[in-house]
Amino acid sequence: MGRQYASLTDEDIEFITVQRVFYMASASGREVNLSPKGYDSLRVIDEKSVLFLDYPGSGDRTARDIRADGGVTLMFTAFTGKPSILRLFCKGRLIEKTDPKFTELMGVFTGCNAQLIRRLLIFDIYAVERSCGKSVPVMEFKEERTDLKAATSKLRDAGTLEKFIKDHETPPVLNSSG
């Protein structure tokens, strides 16, 4: 049986820092968006908030859901060691590149090229949940994929990254009447 509490513990923060992949779900309308995330893209700010590097990809649905005041859940799963699942139930905030806080917050990601980032996301945690994860398989990490960073770098070098980001913004959720 899982347990739920209000903020991250030291054990939770350590668990988050060693995970190589996590999942991000968001919703604000008829469907739930769910995406796996990788890279060294997440930092715990404190026991109630985490910071995420938002690389441009094929969609922008998490930002759309945040703009619509939707919820976000981050899920971390132990694929090695003791089984465990950690969920963070959050509300999100968008930190665009034009925001004065962007440069300051990027400073916690050493060696990251800010030009390749679409924006930063801050997740304000309102509940944390731990569960057993005993059915999750043991898996071995092989390597990071470099495809997204390479494609983003290519767009930046061609001077088309900002156009790509604008062209791939996800439109607002339509209400049930269309």
Image (cartoon, rainbow, N blue to C red):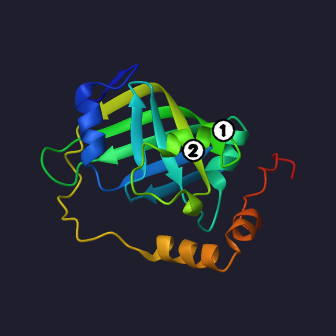
> Which one is nearer the viewer's eye here, 81 or 98?
98
Residue that mark 1 sits on: 100
Residue farthest along the top direction in this orientation: 6
Residue that mark 2 sits on: 103
- Classed neighbour count for the residue bearing mark 2: other residues with Cα under 10 Å, few (<14), some (14–19), many (≥20): some
Q: Position of residue 99 (x, y in %)?
A: 68, 41
Kind of element beneath mark 1: loop
Q: Which residue is drawn at 70% across and 48% down?
A: 64
- Classed neighbour count for the residue bearing mark 1: other residues with Cα under 10 Å, few (<14), some (14–19), many (≥20): few
Q: Where is residue 42 in the image (x, y as percent from the top left)?
A: 41, 46
Q: Is residue 131 visible?
A: no
Q: Which residue is drawn at 22% across and 50% down?
A: 135
Q: Which residue is drawn at 27% across and 71% down?
A: 143
Q: Are marks 2 and 1 in contact (CB under 8 Å)?
A: yes
Kind of element beneath mark 2: helix
Q: At label 2, which amino acid type do we have?
A: Thr
